[in-house]
Structures are given as C-alpha cells and as structure tokens.
Image (cartoon, rainbow, N blue to C red):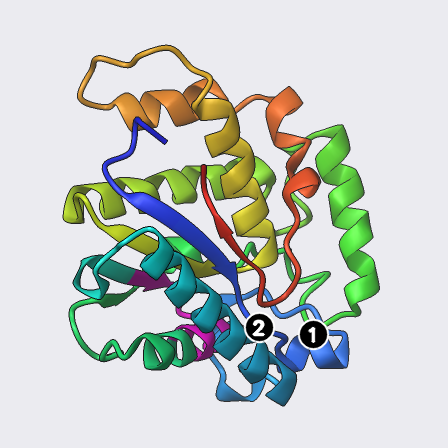
C-alpha cells in the first residue's frame, strides 16, 4: 500500500482455549488471563504461521533485522507472537516486538462476554444492518476502526521501511483489511494527516458493513496488499 511507510502482514492468533471451549472472551480483563492462551493445536498453528512468514521474508529478500512484531496484549495473541518470534529467532523481550493495546480484540459487551460462540452471528447481523450500532455495552465496527487508526498511526510514526507482522484477532483484522482495502482507492492525500484522512473517508456504512468478507481462520497469515 503506497500510502504506508511500512509493509504489513497480519496474523490471526492460533486456536485458543476459548476457541476450543466455544467461548467469547473479548474483554481486556479476561483476555489477558493465562487460562485463555493458545490450545496445543494453536501453538502448532502459530509455529506453521511463523514458518510461512519466514518463507515470505526470504522470498521477498527482507532482512530479519527490519521485521517488527506488533501484537495484541491478550494472552492468546501474546502466546502466538512469542511462538512466531521464536521461529524467526527474534528476542521477544527485545525492541523488535511490541504490544499495542489498540489492536486488541473487539469488546462485544457484557451480554456476550463468556457466552457461546454461537452468539457471534447476532453481532455480525447487527453489523450488516448498522456498523455504527454498538452491541449493548460493547464496541461497534466504527469504534474498532477508530482505535485501529490510532494503532496504525503509532506504527507508521515509530517505524519506517520495516516489515510489520500484526498479530491480532478475527474481528479487528477483518475490519482492518476492509478499511485499508477501501482506503487505497482514495486519491492522493497531501496533508500531514493523510492516513487519518483516508481512514475517516472510508468510515461509512457501505464499507464497514462488509467486514465479514475478509474473515480469517485461526492461525491464518496474510500480506496486506
């Protein structure tokens, strides 16, 4: 994406214990608990994703020194990022890995928290009708776009000419793909807030209501193009 200073890959966390148990764990308070990290299958998925990412880096002649891993602070994403960093031989506690709270899971609200995964469809149905409507006490699609814009602004200001792997969750990553895919169709932005202008320009119902088209499986790696 020519309007960004860095190249981006995205990775949805590997299969987690909440995935395995069929639970929605979307609050930061619950999400950081170790009991909700990766299941054994998810560790395997994260390792495979790391190997695929390493292959992509080699094919694109990208030096590991120019790689940065930015991850959600939830235990399942932190666990995934640690596994990938290990595959890449990058010190997880070093400067190449950074937790960014604004790429955390979408909070679906107290009426959905720790409930069955089957209730996701209620939220996505609401998103299709009105992506600015919040599930009771939770975040709308538009709310998530606002903090993803902040996260991108931080990454673009801190890094330049790097390759970033963004390790996050299903909803935030499909929403991120939706807005960036639409943003790249915008005309040239000449003001210093070009990225923010692009993101705001596509923050409209017709765009945001389509985010499920960009859904990822657990452990799925994609390059943003």
Q: Position of residue 116 (x, y in %)?
A: 79, 69
Q: Is residue 170 visible?
A: yes
Was residue 71 drawn as part of the magenta stretch in this picture? yes
User: Which quadrant of the view contains residue 97?
Assistant: bottom left
Q: Is residue 74 visible?
A: no
Give the residue number, with chain letter if any, for mark 2. 14
Q: Position of residue 64 (x, y in %)?
A: 23, 65
Give the residue number, with chain letter if any, for mark 1. 19
Label 1 neighbour load within 10 Å: few <14, some 14-19, many 20+: some
Distance from Cα at disc 1 to Cα at disc 2: 9 Å
Q: As drawn, is 170 to the left or to the right of 59?
A: right
In this rendering, the count of numbered labels is 2
* Element type where label 2 sits in the image: loop
Q: As drawn, is 145 to the left or to the right of 111?
A: left
Magenta region: 69-81
* Element type where label 1 sits in the image: helix
Label 2 neighbour load within 10 Å: few <14, some 14-19, many 20+: many
Question: Could you tell me which residue is drawn at 25 percent across and 60 percent down?
Answer: 67
* Relative vertical location of residue 206 with respect to residue 68 in this rendering, above or below: above
The label nearer to you, 1 versus 2, is 2
Question: Could you tell me which residue is drawn at 45 percent across and 37 percent down?
Answer: 225
* Relative vertical location of residue 203 with respect to residue 66 in this rendering, above or below: above
């Amino acid at each position: 994406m020519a309007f960004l200073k860095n190249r981006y890959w995205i990775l949805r966390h590997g299969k987690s214990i909440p995935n395995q148990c069929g639970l929605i764990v979307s609050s930061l308070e619950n999400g950081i608990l170790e009991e909700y990290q990766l299941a054994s299958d998810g560790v395997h998925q994260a390792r495979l994703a790391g190997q695929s990412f390493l292959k992509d880096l080699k094919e694109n002649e990208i030096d590991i020194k120019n790689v940065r891993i930015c991850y959600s602070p939830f235990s399942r994403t932190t666990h995934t990022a640690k596994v990938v960093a290990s595959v890449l031989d990058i010190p997880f506690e070093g400067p190449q890995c950074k937790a960014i709270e604004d790429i955390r899971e979408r909070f679906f609200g107290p009426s959905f928290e720790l409930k069955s995964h089957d209730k996701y469809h209620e939220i996505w149905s609401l998103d299709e009708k009105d992506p600015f409507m919040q599930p009771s006490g939770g975040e709308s699609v538009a709310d998530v776009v606002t903090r993803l814009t902040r996260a991108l602004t931080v990454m673009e200001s801190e890094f330049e000419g790097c390759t970033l792997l963004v390790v996050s969750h299903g909803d935030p990553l499909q929403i991120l793909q939706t807005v960036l895919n639409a943003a790249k169709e915008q005309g040239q932005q000449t003001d210093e807030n070009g990225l923010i202008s692009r993101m705001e320009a596509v923050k409209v119902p017709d765009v945001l209501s389509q985010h499920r088209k960009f859904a990822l499986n657990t452990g799925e790696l994609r390059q943003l193009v």
